[in-house]
Every structure is written in C-alpha cells, then in structure tokens.
Amino acid sequence: MNGPIGLFDSGFGGLTVMRELIEWLPNESFVYLGDTANLPYGNKSPETVIRYARANAAFLMSQGIKLLVIPCHTASCHALDVLRQELPIPVVGMIEPGLQLVQPFQRIAILGTASTIASGLYQTQIAQCAPQVKIFAQACPLFVPLIEEGFHEHESAYLIAQSYLEELKGKIDAALLACTHYPLLRKVLSAVLGPDIALIEPAVSAAKSVKAILMQKNLLRTHPESPRHQFFASDDPEKFRKFGKLFLGQSIEKVEKK
Ligand code: DGL
C-alpha cells in the first residue's frame, strides 16, 4: 500500500493529470515516465502504441507501483484493455473519466490526436452511454508538436486552431479535450471557439476514480514520511525537467534517464 502510483505518457502531457492527482491524493508518491524517445504517439499505429505502452508499464512495474494511470488518451484508446488483462494491479485510463463528463451536453466536439480519433473509441462509447449527444470528432495533429515546443500561446497556435475548428463554430456546446497536452491550449481554444463553449478535461474525474479505487482496495499510503515523486524520461531528461514545470505547475528537481 505504500508503493507509488505510476503514470506514463509520450511526453509532458500526462503531467497535467499528475497535477490533479497530487491535489486529490497529497499523501501519495508518484513515478512518472515520459516516453520522449518515442513522442509523438498520436500519429502511430495501434500496434506500435501497444508496444510502447507494454514497455512503459513493465518499467513502472519494476519501480514497485501499486496502481497504473494512463493519462495519455492515445495509449488509453489502444492499450488500456491489454494492460488491464496483463497487469496484476488496477489500471485507470482516460476514456471512462471523460465519459462521466459528457452527459450534460447536447453537442460535443472530441478533440484528439489522429490516432485517438481514428480509433473511434470515444465516438462509440459516447454514443452508447449518452445517445442523445451529437458528436463531432476532430483530429488536431499539429497541437502536440506546437505545445511541446512551447508555442501554445503563439499566434501560430491561433491560426492552426482556427483552421481545425472553424467548421465546428456554432455547432457545439462543449469540446472534450481528449489529449493530455490540450489543457495548455485553453486560452487559444476559448478564443477560437468562443467563451461560452465548455472545455471538458477528464483529469479531475480520473483523479477521483483513482482515489475511489485506492480507498476501496485499501491501498491508500499510510507511511508517515512525506511522499516522494520520481520522474523519468526516455530521451533528453534535461528538456523534460525544464518544460515539465509548465505542465505540472511546480518545479521538477530531477529527471532520470530511463
Ligand atoms: N498526450 C498524448 C494524448 O493524450 C499523446 C500526444 C502524442 O504523443 O501525440 O493523446
């Protein structure tokens, strides 16, 4: 029960989810792996994403994790079921937490990587659990590289968002941010879609699910010492350390090479 919670993403994006997890579970330790050597996942085939996800999970298991969170929506779409079958610990992805938030809306845009949108998973799951919702799915493949380069508020971000989202204007009430990177584009998305469009982020409901599972399985950390967070990157740990702050909302002291 005193082991850490593990998370992996292709890069920094999952730190936006870890930020919420720390908020909801301040007594827990976390191990985060950014698979920066293989970034981006969003334009890769399901087989490749599953291969990366298996390797990341094996690494985190070797760190003694008690629960795995897959904040990456692309990996959640392709590898969640596989890892749930293969791992002896609970695995939380992003699809179910996202589904919990769509009910109040009539017309929703799902914004995600090309691979997430092509999987069709969000579309079919929303159609099943909220058949009244009209769904628009939009792949935004240039968003992740823009954000990874720190261009999330640059005028180019507005132009690119404009070109992806122009067609959706006036047709939606909400946009589901089905990629962990996209919360950094909130300002741009609101400017382009309009301030009344709700931007739905599954991170908080994922954090609540993790808390509920830990409580239910009696896995909450009870160690008297302060929790410890560890960060690994499969490439360029120094870049990860510097940029990670933007996503996590606090400085990262040390990033180790996986
Ligand atoms: N941040 C990941 C996601 O949520 C993937 C980004 C990428 O590597 O393309 O989908």
Image (cartoon, rainbow, N blue to C red):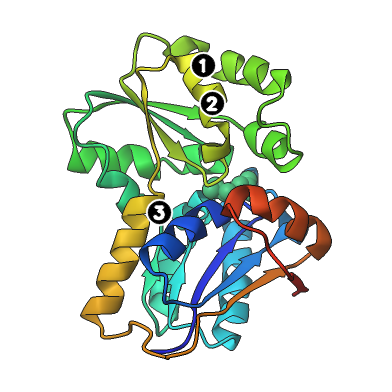
Q: Is mark 3 within 8 Å of ligand 1?
A: yes
State whether residue 162 is above or below residue 14: above
Residue tagged 1: 191
Q: Mark 3, mark 1: which one is toward the viewer? A: 1
| Mark 2 nearby-residue class (10 Å; few <14, some 14–19, many ≥20) | few
Tell me, for residue 12, which label it has, or none: none
Label 3 – label 1 distance at C-alpha = 26 Å
Residue tagged 2: 187
Secondary structure category for the residue under label 1: helix
Q: Amino acid at mark 3?
A: Met
Frontmost residue, 102 versus 25: 25
State whether residue 114 is above or below residue 6: above
| Mark 3 nearby-residue class (10 Å; few <14, some 14–19, many ≥20) | many
Quadrant (top left, top right, bottom left, bottom right) of the C terminus:
bottom right
- Report the residue at 60% width, 49% height from top: 247
Residue 245: percent from left, percent from top = 66, 53
Frontmost residue, 82 versus 67: 67
Secondary structure category for the residue under label 2: helix
- First in sequence, mark 3 or 2: give its number: 3
Q: Quadrant of residue 26?
A: bottom left
Q: Relative to 122, is 10 on the left or the right?
A: right
